[in-house]
Image (cartoon, rainbow, N blue to C red):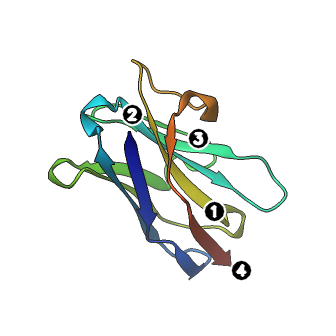
Amino acid sequence: QVQLVESGGGLVQAGGSLRLSCVASGRTFSIFAVGWFRQAPGKEREFVAALTWGGINTDYAESVRGRFTLSRANAKNTVYLQMNSLKPNDTAVYYCAARFGRTLSSYSSDYTYWGQGTQVSVSP
């Protein structure tokens, strides 16, 4: 079992920044990658970014590339999503998820464990 807890969401004006954290516990040695997804009201969950657990490889959705950055604090089993130049359409509940296997993935069905989500709201 792997447990994931997100934090760092909040309300920010357009152009502002937030840093989300995802703390993993349990069988973290079995994690291959951590992904971030988001879901806005009335919309499907969409891929945001993913990072291999070793912190070497990353993948970003086109909509966030150049604005969002993933990093990992190994000793803390924590993955960070730094979000800059936020836009109102970034407003959503953001979830982190853990994936086993051997490749990064942008498909939510490829992720086994999920956090409870953290709300990000960006005002115009």
Residue with the mark numbered 2: 33
Residue 93 got which mark?
Answer: 1
Q: Residue at coordinates 85% horizontally, 58% vertically from top-left?
A: 42
Q: Are marks 3 and 2 in contact (CB under 8 Å)?
A: no
Q: Earlier in the sequence, mark 3 or mark 2?
A: 2
Q: Position of residue 49 (x, y in %)?
A: 50, 43
Residue denoted by label 3? 61
The mark nearer the N terminus, 2 or 4, is 2
Nearer to me, 16 or 3: 3
Circle 4 packing at 10 Å, graded few (<14), some (14-19), many (20+), is: few
Q: Which residue is mark 4?
A: 124
Q: At label 2, which amino acid type do we have?
A: Ala
Is 117 located above or below residue 110 in the figure? below
Amino acid identity at mark 3:
Ala
Lower sequence index among marks 1 and 4: 1
SS for callout 2: strand
Q: Nearer the viewer, mark 3 or mark 2?
A: 2
Q: Are marks 1 and 2 in contact (CB under 8 Å)?
A: no
Residue drawn at (60%, 70%) of the image: 119
Rendering quarter of residue 20: bottom left
Question: In the orientation shown, which residue stands out farthest toward the right?
Answer: 42
Would you say 79 lies left or right of 84 here? left
Q: Earlier in the sequence, mark 1 or mark 3?
A: 3
Q: Disc 4 residue type?
A: Pro
Look at the numbered disc 1 and give the secondary structure of its residue: strand
Relative to the observer, which residue lies in front, 31 or 35?
A: 31
